[in-house]
Image (spheres, rainbow, N blue to C red):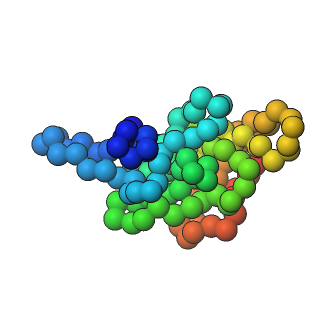
Amino acid sequence: MRPTEQGRNVIVKREPSGVCTDLNPQPFNARTRAHEYGGGDYIVDGGTIYFSNFEDQRLYRQSASSEPQPITPVSEMRYADGCVDKQRQRLICVREDHSIRDSEAVSTIVSLSLEDKTTAPGTRGRQ
């Protein structure tokens, strides 16, 4: 957490030599509002980071030398607690649906395909 950046959460890689590198660039803030207190907001798999961005609550994919790319659409959904299923090439996570006003959020376990490496206009995979 970076107090000097309005509390932005940064994913940091520490090399064996002790050198630290910020991975998610500004203004990306690796933080989720799922479960209200925040759940697991990122996972790293094979050099690729999947994280929930606090501002829009979308999931993003970021490879070593690329900018974060959204893998979920703009919506009233929140994502947390991801894990990668390598065998089926999918990300499994909790999705909270906040689209129905004046009611409790609905939590669902969803899977998102990781096979399509392009920026997605919508959520892919089974939900």
Q: Nearer the viewer, residue 127 or 8?
A: 8
Q: Nearer the viewer, residue 31 or 48?
A: 31
Above or below residue 74? Residue 22 is above
Residue 91 visible in the shown view: yes
Residue at 82% across / 33% down in the picture? 104
Q: Nearer the viewer, residue 104 or 110?
A: 104
Above or below residue 77? Residue 109 is above
- Percent position (x, y) of residue 101? 85, 43
Residue 80: image quadrant is top right
- Percent position (x, y) of residue 97? 76, 43
Residue at 39% across / 47% down in the picture? 5
- Please identify the quadrant where the N terminus is shown: top left
Residue lying furthest left in this view? 17
- Percent position (x, y) of residue 81? 57, 36
Residue lying furthest bottom in this view? 118
Q: Seen in the image, is 42 located left or right of residue 22?
A: right
Q: Seen in the image, is 67 located left or right of residue 40?
A: left
Residue at 47% across / 61% down in the picture? 68
- Percent position (x, y) of residue 70? 57, 61
Q: Seen in the image, is 8 located left or right of residue 40?
A: left
Above or below residue 1? Residue 58 is below
Residue 48 visible in the shown view: no
Residue 33: image quadrant is top right
